[in-house]
Amino acid sequence: MILDSKIPPGPIERKWTDYRFDMKLINPANKRKHKVIVVGTGLAGASASATLAELGYNVHAFTFHDSPRRAHSIAAQGGINAAKNYPNDGDSVHRLFYDTVKGGDFRAREANVHRLAEISTQIIDQCVAQGVPFAREYGGLLDNRSFGGAQVSRTFYARGQTGQQLLLGAYQALMRQVGLGQLKLHARQEMLDVVVVDGQARGIITRNLVTGALERHEADAVILATGGYGRVFYLSTNAAGSNVTATWRAHKRGALFANPCYTQIHPTCIPVSGDHQSKLTLMSESLRNDGRVWVPKKAGDVRSPDQIPESDRWYFLEEKYPSFGNLVPRDVASRNAKQACDQGLGVGETRLAVYLDFSDAIKRLGESKISEKYGNLFHMYAKITDENPYRVPMRIYPAVHYTMGGLWVDYNLMSSLPGLHVLGEANFSDHGANRLGASALMQGLADGYFVIPYTLGNYLASNKISKVTTDHAAFADAERSVKDRLDKLLAVRGGKPAVEFHKQLGKVMWDYCGMARNEAGLKHALQEIPKIRESFWREVSVTGHGQDFNQALEEAGRIADFLEFGELLVLDAFTRRESCGGHFREESQTPDNEALRDDENYCHVAAWEYKGVGETSALHKEPLTFENVHLTQRSYK
Amino acid sequence: MSGKLNFKLRLWRQKDKVSEGKFQEVEAKNISPDMSFLEMLDEVNNDLMRKGEEPVAFESDCREGICGTCSLVVNGLPHGPEKGTTVCQLFMRKFRDGQTISVEPWRAAAFPVIKDLVTDRDAFDQIIAAGGFVSVNTGGAQDANALPVRKCDADTAMDAAACIGCGACVAACPNASAMLFTAAKISHLGHLPQGQPERERRALRMVAKMDELGFGNCSNHYECEAACPKEISVEHIARMNRDYGLSALLGTERERGNTGAG
């Protein structure tokens, strides 16, 4: 299989502009004849659904939540990047492009990233026009703050609730189209299969989560915007419902899965406190604008932090990376926190935490200014830990947060399965091996508002799409395979809730394929995961029946998919014998423990083809070329 | 941390929308004080499943107080006893060992029960679809800084926009009114210049939809503000009433005028 990324010709700053002219258009009156399915209503899905409906397409939007507004984009805290250069501090489209390629450790496509940087400015304009209440200065203009991996302030924010406000903007645009009758919303519907007719994605099978009924939906094209797979680690900052099911089922129908081993471990999360925890909570990276990260210099120093004088503290990020200080990229900050704890310098009861200290900033700016900037985060921290972060330093530790890997897509955001398009975190395209802070919101909205509305029209206008109804045999086959799997889950009648297997899987993933990975550990994980999967299918307890609102059945289905997908993630990590960004192979590091890439052998996208459960997937490589940014060892010193 | 806790739970069980519901008594044993209320329910459900019994249905997603999915009435209070807190952020250290805790769904005619503790809040989406937006299509927006907004207005808009759409305001109100939810959106958009062109029409349409869906009226009990996990102020209701009054007087005329041309 040849992976054609379909990157347009020409100089990088002209590619998207010229390509938009070259793409075919659909006349306004004909757009309504095209039915488009969008699965997922987060930033990418809601913005795509609203925009396509505005253009006149017949859009059907699906969400497994009760309302489109619940998607996990809502929980993004810190902000959204854009190359506006309002602070006049040297930003530009080219600098955002450069920072993102470098931040991703040279494992993203240049052309995609440049397009993202170009579009970034339009996103802010669009969101402000919708009434998104971004933070402002007294002069009435928009405020900016800094995020990791950049030396300019280009992050727009709405207190610590930027994702919420951007999602509500997109959700309101979507609901407006519902009110206008341009868009049909299908809430509480979980996509369980993609239907392929004559080699094209032509529909989906969903389960109505209230009645349990399976439904067939046909369309001219299918768009997946179903988020990331971070919960394969069980504990993560993702929502309880976040899952890999939609992308995994599409993968089984022929869409290649790219770079699954690129997972982001976020440095500033509230540490694990016990085995009862269902999730971990992020403390926004924006806190590193004002918080200083430190540990005691001596191992086993159990004094309370206010009793440890300056001379006995090690501000390890500021010391090792003087140029970027506390604002190094996430992969670097996480690895350094882990190394400090591995050296016995960790703090708190578990010794698996470092301090994030605001006392200097509170002295400098006053408590009320800090509260205005981060009030909701401090409030959340206090609730969870029962400690007051205005008085004592926060304790933080890295946790799984975001997944850069996803379904492989070309420049048009179309997967290797014709007609199936993939947006936002669900695709792999823009962040390489490490995503910079405040870039996920940017990518989700770029894909939905400004890329897919063009490229989807081009796909529909350039391809023959024959009439298909849900009576087609492919729909019956797909529905039967979905039903068989649900019946199989219900038939086990074992004694263990599905979550027990999820926790086992998560432990293997975190211990052997987490912040640091090595050959022996990955081999071990490849042996363990199939064993957990087999015991799941022997012992899982799924109560109730299929024709009902049945959360045990929903959850078991998602965990069953994680038990298959986890193996692919580890296989990808095993195969990529270099370190890059969030993928740290212990065998491949510089003398001062930084990630050491192997550009000779691994400067490519690894795209995997499904071959069956327990069978080894086939690897396809898309070479990456760098014509505008030089491949160098990343440095933030 | 301190020792484990035990509780007697009274959980509302209801098969579906049409069936009658009743309380089921269940023991919650060996609960860590650091567990959230929902993690405690997870444990109870796991025990039920190990015995082959059906777990109690309840909804949650982000578990960090922002998605608005979780929706439990705990000892008669939406989201439980702690002020400014969703039930997913309520921790068991706030309860006494041995305490009896009743857990019920939102109770409102416009939020029918789907199963056990899960309700259908589709009505909120319908209120937004009626007018809770700025009518601007993607593309063609002017530069974001072309229109300055006073900081105090942007801040007040953000205060209102912080609503998570959970429905606790409705559940707390003796009349099951959706005034605070609706007002929060009207006030968010009404405080910004982008929201001005549709201001009257928005109030008129959203309020009409709210009434149509069977939500009650406001009789100034302010239970909504007390229950709101984001502590959204009832002052926004006063603003909504102003916009609504204005549109009832003038807005319908203007709206008729607007649709005439073109």
Image: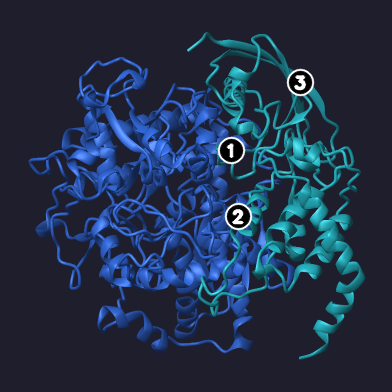
Chain colours: A blue, B cyan
Closer-to-camera residue (A376/B16): A376
Residue at the location (40% across, 69% down)? A84
Label at residue A553: 1
Q: Which residue is mark 3?
A: B24
Q: Quadrant of residue A177?
A: bottom right
Distance of label 2 from label 3 (alpha carbons):
31 Å
Three-letter amino acid code at disc 1? Leu
| Contact (Cβ within 8 Å) of mark 2 with mark 3 | no
Residue B158 is situated, as x and y percent measured from the top left of the image, at 62, 53
A524 in relation to B184, above or below:
above
Closer-to-camera residue (B1/A21): B1
Q: Which residue is mark 2?
A: A63
Mark 2 belongs to chain: A
**Label 2 crowd bin: few (<14), some (14–19), many (20+), radius 10 Å:** many
Q: Dividing the image into 4 quarters, which one contains the C terminus of chain B?
A: bottom right
Residue B213 is situated, as x and y percent measured from the top left of the image, at 85, 54
Distance of label 2 from label 1 (alpha carbons):
17 Å
Residue A211 is situated, as x and y percent measured from the top left of the image, at 71, 46
Left or right of B83? Residue A508 is left
Three-letter amino acid code at disc 3? Gln
Identify the element where label 3 is drawn.
Answer: strand
A593 in relation to B35, above or below:
below
Identify the element where label 1 is drawn.
Answer: helix
A245 in relation to A117, above or below:
above
Closer-to-camera residue (A516/A185): A516
B41 in relation to A240, above or below:
above
Q: Is residue A472 visible?
A: no
Residue A346 is situated, as x and y percent measured from the top left of the image, at 28, 24
Residue at the location (59% across, 18% down)? B93
Mark 3 belongs to chain: B
